[in-house]
Image (cartoon, coloured by chain):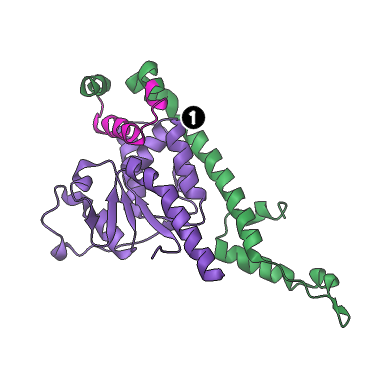
């Protein structure tokens, strides 16, 4: 059965591409997702800080307020990591925060362009791992399924 | 309605609901009541939610465009205008993200981007 809301996490590389380029396809799709009341975008302080760090490492000048505003309207989930329980099979141990976030936020989708994350497709626990293209291909279908389900419940 | 929005700019949707509920209970709005001398008015708060969402998304898009404008010359400086424009024309979202990842992973060496890309 389709959930009432899609809970989705976008990896830092998605936000990075969104802000450094002016690609209409990416902007339009992300705006569509963000505007949908059927979608809850989840992020963590780690994702936001990683975006800031990546921009700073490029020595780009930008306003921190603009980054804060970028995450406005999204759901901040704080995860405390217990290092003793860190899974050892991750290709990049730094990615653990993302999987912990997916687990604790009960995200349906984790969208990334990072090969280390995508290596764990199709799922981490209950969270589906997809590329942005795969998620965009599936998106309209998911929204239609939720709308149909909601209408059936209300009638 | 829209005149209320600027003051509500920094509040959450939950707080926005409270503000609206409080406003509806205020003396100013009781003038619309008439059943037995009072008129009952039902307002679907989802209407306000939708309006708030539209407004919030407009603000979000404006912020994104300003951020992109700020970063554009700096990114062009790194990868060149031709490559920047090429990436902006891509329709494959994974290719855009991959271009971002390449840029993210080439630090302090602008020429590395081109080398990695070629």
Q: Colour of chain B?
A: green
Local secondary structure at mark 1: helix
Q: Residue at x 51, y 52 (%)?
A: A36
Examine the residues drawn in magenta and state their main secondary structure. Answer: helix
Residue A36 lies left or right of residue B114; in this view the side is: right
Residue extending farthest right: B37
Relative to residue A12, is residue A91 drawn left or right? left
Q: Is residue B74 visible?
A: yes
Whether residue A39 is visible here, answered yes or no, is: no
Residue A93, x across and y down, in percent: 16, 51
Q: Nearer the viewer, residue A64 or B114?
A: B114
Residue farthest bottom in this picture:
B36
Left or right: B40 in relation to A8: right
Q: Which residues are magenta?
A: B86-108
The vertical placement of A60 against A111, above or below, is above
Q: Residue at x 49, y 43 (%)?
A: A31
Q: Chain of mark 1?
A: B
Q: Position of residue A66 (x, y in %)?
A: 48, 42
Q: Examine the rendered structure and indicate whether residue B23 appears above or below residue B48.
A: below
The residue at which mark 1 appears reads as B69
Can you tell which quarter of the image residue A12 is in? Answer: top left
Chain identifier, purple in the render:
A
| Residue that protrudes farthest toward the left in the picture | A88
Residue B101 falls within the magenta-colored stretch? yes
- Location of residue A81 by image quarter: bottom left
- The spot of residue A109 in percent (x, y) is 33, 54
Q: Residues within 10 Å of mark 1 (few under 14, many from 20)?
A: some
Image height of B110 relative to A91, above or below: above
Quadrant where the image shows the N terminus of chain A: bottom left
Count of labels shown?
1
Residue at screen point 37% across, 20% down = B77
Which of the pair A134/A15 is nearer the observer? Answer: A134
């Amino acid at each position: 059965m389709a959930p009432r809301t899609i809970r989705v996490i976008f990896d830092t590389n998605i936000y990075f591409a969104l802000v450094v380029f002016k690609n209409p396809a990416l902007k339009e799709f992300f705006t569509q997702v963000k505007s949908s009341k059927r979608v809850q975008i989840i992020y963590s302080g780690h994702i936001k800080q990683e975006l800031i760090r990546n921009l700073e490492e490029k020595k780009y000048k930008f306003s921190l307020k603009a980054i804060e505003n970028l995450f406005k309207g999204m759901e901040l989930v704080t995860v405390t990591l217990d290092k003793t329980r860190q899974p050892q099979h991750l290709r990049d141990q730094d990615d653990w925060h993302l999987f912990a976030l997916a687990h604790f936020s009960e995200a349906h989708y984790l969208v990334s362009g990072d090969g280390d994350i995508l290596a764990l497709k199709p799922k981490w626990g209950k969270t589906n791992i997809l590329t942005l293209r795969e998620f965009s291909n599936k998106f309209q279908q998911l929204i239609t399924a939720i709308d149909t389900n909601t209408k059936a419940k209300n009638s | 309605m829209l005149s209320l929005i600027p003051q509500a700019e920094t509040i959450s949707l939950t707080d926005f609901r409270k503000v609206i509920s409080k406003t509806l209970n205020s003396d100013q709005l009781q003038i619309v009541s008439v059943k037995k001398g009072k008129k009952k008015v039902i307002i679907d708060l989802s209407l306000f939610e939708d309006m708030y969402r539209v407004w919030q998304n407009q603000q979000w898009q404006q912020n994104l465009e300003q951020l992109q404008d700020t970063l554009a010359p700096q990114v062009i400086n790194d990868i060149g205008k031709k490559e920047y424009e090429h990436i902006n024309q891509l329709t494959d979202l994974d290719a855009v993200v991959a271009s971002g990842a390449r840029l993210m992973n080439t630090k302090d060496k602008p020429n590395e981007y081109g080398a990695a890309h070629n």
